[in-house]
Image (spheres, rainbow, N blue to C red):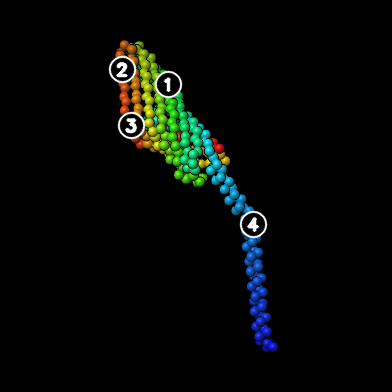
């Protein structure tokens, strides 16, 4: 028979074991309670992120419309007085990162103003006319960060644009009326970057910019000053330059 000391030691050990079991059970219950309380919210956020990512990956087409600014010497067609230009674009997805695109742009501007005469002439010379600019391009867009909320892309396109300008003036009595005509055509390629941000499912905005271009251009201009004579000028050649032609677009993907 064990003595009183041994029995007391055994009871003490049993008590410690029971308290350890109780503590472990309480700890487990608390952890499960916390997990149950936080789990639905975390699962909801994770599920929402997963659904948004799956929706972006399922997109096959993009339609976009926006405004493009051509600064002097920038973009297809060089300087345009028809700024800003309206642009329309359609894209087709080929892979997770690669999209094919087609875009058209166009703009129109008219002016009527009085230009101060110089030299021996006094007064202002009425000047009126208009400028039209239009073009299109085909290309590809490579998405560097396809699964990010902000999708950064590289753009490469090739196309053509044409700009015409027609102006006429009614000079002072000592100066006959005159006209000015100019035509510029450019065929070339351009590279750029873009940043997309989705606002709601399927609808987002895009900021883009052309950063370099190269191509072949031809320009013709005719100035007819009536009895003072007529002059013509023409230039053709290749061009390559760094540039900046920003654009802002609203896009719809499906």
Mark 3 vs mark 1: which is more N-terminal?
1
Q: How much space separates mark 2 and mark 1, taking CA atoms?
A: 20 Å
Along the line of sight, the residue nearer the viewer: 207 or 32: 32
Tell me the number on the disc at residue 37. Answer: 4
Q: How much space separates mark 2 and mark 3, taking CA atoms?
A: 25 Å
Q: Nearer the viewer, mark 2 or mark 3?
A: 3
Say whether marks 3 and 1 touch (CB < 8 Å).
Answer: no
Q: Secondary structure at mark 1?
A: strand
Q: Quadrant of residue 113?
A: top left
The spot of residue 58 in percent (x, y) is 55, 41
Left or right, residue 142 beside residue 178: right
Give above or below for 209 relative to 145.
Answer: above
Q: Identify the residue position indicated by label 3 in the image.
A: 239
The spot of residue 89 in percent (x, y) is 49, 32
Q: Nearer the viewer, mark 3 or mark 4?
A: 3
Q: How much space separates mark 4 and mark 1, taking CA atoms?
A: 68 Å
Along the line of sight, the residue nearer the viewer: 7 or 169: 7
Mark 4 vs mark 1: which is more N-terminal?
4
Mark 2 vs mark 4: which is more N-terminal?
4
Q: Nearer the viewer, mark 4 or mark 1?
A: 4
Q: Residue at x 47, y 40 (%)?
A: 98
Q: Identify the residue position indicated by label 2 in the image.
A: 231
Residue 195 visible? The answer is no
Q: Residue at x 37, y 28 (%)?
A: 186
């Amino acid at each position: 028979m064990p003595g009183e000391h041994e029995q007391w030691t055994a009871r003490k050990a049993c008590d410690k074991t029971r308290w350890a079991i109780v503590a472990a059970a309480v700890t487990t219950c608390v952890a499960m309670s916390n997990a149950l309380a936080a789990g639905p919210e975390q699962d909801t956020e994770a599920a929402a992120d997963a659904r948004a990512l799956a929706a972006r990956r399922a997109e096959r087409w993009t339609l976009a419309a926006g405004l493009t600014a051509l600064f002097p010497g920038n973009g297809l067609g060089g300087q345009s007085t028809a700024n800003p230009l309206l642009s329309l674009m359609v894209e087709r997805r080929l892979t997770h990162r690669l999209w094919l695109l087609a875009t058209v742009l166009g703009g129109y501007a008219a002016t009527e103003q009085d230009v101060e005469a110089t030299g021996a002439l006094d007064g202002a010379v009425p000047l009126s006319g208009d400028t039209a600019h239009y073009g299109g391009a085909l290309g590809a867009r490579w998405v560097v960060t396809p699964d990010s909320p902000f999708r950064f892309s590289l753009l490469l396109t090739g196309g053509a644009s044409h700009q015409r300008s027609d102006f006429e003036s009614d000079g002072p009595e000592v100066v006959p009326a005159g006209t000015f005509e100019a035509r510029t055509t450019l065929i070339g390629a351009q590279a750029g970057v873009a940043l997309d941000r989705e606002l709601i499912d399927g609808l987002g905005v895009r900021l883009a910019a052309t950063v370099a271009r190269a191509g072949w251009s031809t320009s013709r201009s005719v100035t007819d000053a009536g009895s003072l004579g007529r002059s013509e000028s023409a230039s053709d050649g290749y061009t390559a330059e760094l540039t900046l032609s920003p654009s802002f677009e609203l896009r719809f993907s499906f």
